[in-house]
Amino acid sequence: MVKRAIIHVENTEGVVDFARYLSEAGWTILTANKTEELLKAEKIPVIREQALVESNYHLNETSSLMRQILLTKYNKEEKFISTDNDETNIYVICVNITPVMNVNITSSKYNQQILPSNFFITSLLRNTFSNHENVLILTDPEDYKEAIIQLKTDNISKEFRTYLAAKALNLISAFDAGLSASILQGQQYNVQFMNYLMYPYKKNMALHEGSNSQQKSFLYKSPTESGALNGFLKLQGKELTHNIICDISFAWERISTLYAILKNQYTVKSTNSDGYDFTTQFTPLTGTVFTIAVKFNTIVGAALSTNVLDSFSKAYEYDTYNIKDVVVACSSVIDAAAATEMVKGNFAAIVAPSFTMEAKQILSSNRNIRLVPSAKVATTNLDGRLVNGGLLLQTKDNSLFEHWHVRTKNRPSQFKTDEMAFGMLLLIGARSYSAVLLKDNSLIGIGQGCTSTNRALTVTLQDARERVERKKTSGEAVNNENPDLANPIGDVLICDSTIQFDEPVKKLIDSGITAIIQTGGTPADNEFINYCDERGVVMVFTGMTHISF
């Protein structure tokens, strides 16, 4: 009796050993294309199957092959049972394909490009599923070892067959989902919200633990080449956890969003307090370095500067007493000067486009710090959240400003204009309600994830006052009569929503703030504007919120 197997794989992991076992056990192997080349190179005898050739656009010979698979019979007691012709029996199907997304589908040669050359594989697997009680379907290299064990004993369990068949369906659905998303979300149709939300995310990495030690977690990656976690690599350090992955993604997305909007000349239509229309221009970020420190998806430090060391120092200076086990992300290559300071810190991970050889050597002395190069730009356009019984999905908030309304008599200086943009980009994606206080493009105080804007302002002011106290302790010179005004700890206040005009904001203004940007739109706006004008404080209304949870 002839025992025949099909081997036709894109993921070649473990396939040579599996094919060698079948060959040595007397199986006939049918294959084609790259799998055929691989097995022949390993001196494993194979027979070319025309139904599997790559140019099989019109499914020539495929229907015949499918019929052979559907006619195959297997009896647990009598082992392999032949029909009238042994050649019609195919007992093992070792086939896999790689689901892809964002396939380049253009108007030229559209019919050929919409139907990938390996599309017939899904039809082959789907038909094989209908006869899975007789045919062993292998689509995952992790199952080859168990398959060999059960084949050796001629005792293939029904449970194992069903398990493998279900995995084949999972692969089929992933392939189809990637192809359909590529078409629907491509330039021709641009469908943001499909009827069925399906993307072929691939199980990639078992994490050390979930948010807590009693939880399990796995990292699934998108098959596209974009996104913060693609190109992801850990050079050194402890195992990765669920929380650290979340912080890496959050931090790198903040950097990607900032440079996507402000790398080149960015402008926004604006209106003066007297109704005069003009255009506000922001300084491009070319030549600047952005560093951000994140813990539990909460910003604990951030700064812009002209070099890596200064950017890191300003971000880290904000909360040096409390900043521990955080993820630090930097927009530029980490050099030796920055690494010399970073190695002293208690960081969970450092994320950057790359690390110089000198920086790697310096940081290697602290093996607790994970080094993560991540050169890919975060490009996800949708935000999602699992809820009980469903999934909420929305477009990502990446529109910085739609219009500026300068409500005070004075406009902000160019430097403060740029600080306003930097601060608002920090708040995009931060847990709301949120407010941030900046000085010299460095985060000085922040309140985030609060139940109200007033609470966010109170927390921000508390942060600022604590920093003044630390300066006193460290011996920095301050004015004893009014240290805030003599050495204002913050210049620009940014809020992700509407600020109510009451005591918290008055205290912030009286502490030395010179510019405010917020949504605006309360009955007390005019009173608020007059209060700012009297104190020479610039205020801008945006008319839009940046709420995130």
Image (spheres, helix red, strand yellow):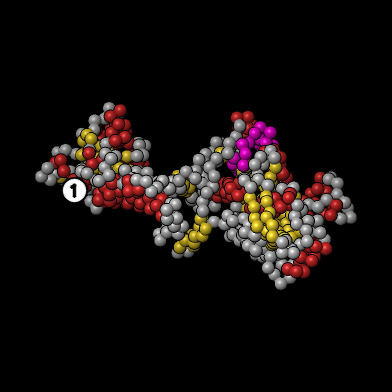
Quadrant of residue 363 within the rendered picture? top right
| Residue at x 70% of width, y 42% of height | 305
- In this rendering, does residue 409 appear at all? yes
Q: Quadrant of residue 50?
A: top left
Question: Along the line of sight, which residue is nearer the eye, 122 or 115?
Answer: 115
Q: Residues within 10 Å of mark 1 (few under 14, many from 20)?
A: some
Number of marks drawn: 1
- Magenta stretch: includes residue 347: yes
Location of the N terminus by quadrant is top left
Question: Where in the figure is residue 97, as x and y percent of width and height?
Answer: 34, 43
300 above or below 367? Answer: below
Q: Is residue 208 visible?
A: no
Q: Residue at x 27, y 36 (%)?
A: 32
Q: Position of residue 107 (x, y in %)?
A: 38, 48
- Give the residue furthest to the bottom: 523
Write the residue at 52% across / 58% down: 395
Between residues 361 and 505, which one lies in front from this camera angle? 505
> Is residue 8 placed above or below 506 in the rendered structure?
above
| Residue 149, horizontal then vertical, whole percent | 29, 40
Image quadrant in which the C terminus is located: bottom right
Query: Residue at coordinates 74% horizontally, 63% vertically from top-left?
Result: 273
Q: Is residue 167 left or right of residue 298?
A: left
Judging by the rendered image, the residue that carries numbered circle 1 is 67
Asked whether, in this view, residue 219 is left or right of residue 546, the answer is left
The residue most toward the left is: 84
* Left or right of 326 in this view: 505: right
Question: Which element carries disc 1, helix, strand or loop?
Answer: helix
Q: Amino acid at mark 1?
A: Arg
In this view, the residue farthest toward the right is: 481
Magenta stretch, residue numbers: 331-352
Q: Does the magenta-highlighted stretch encompass residue 78? A: no
> Residue 254: x, y in percent?
60, 49
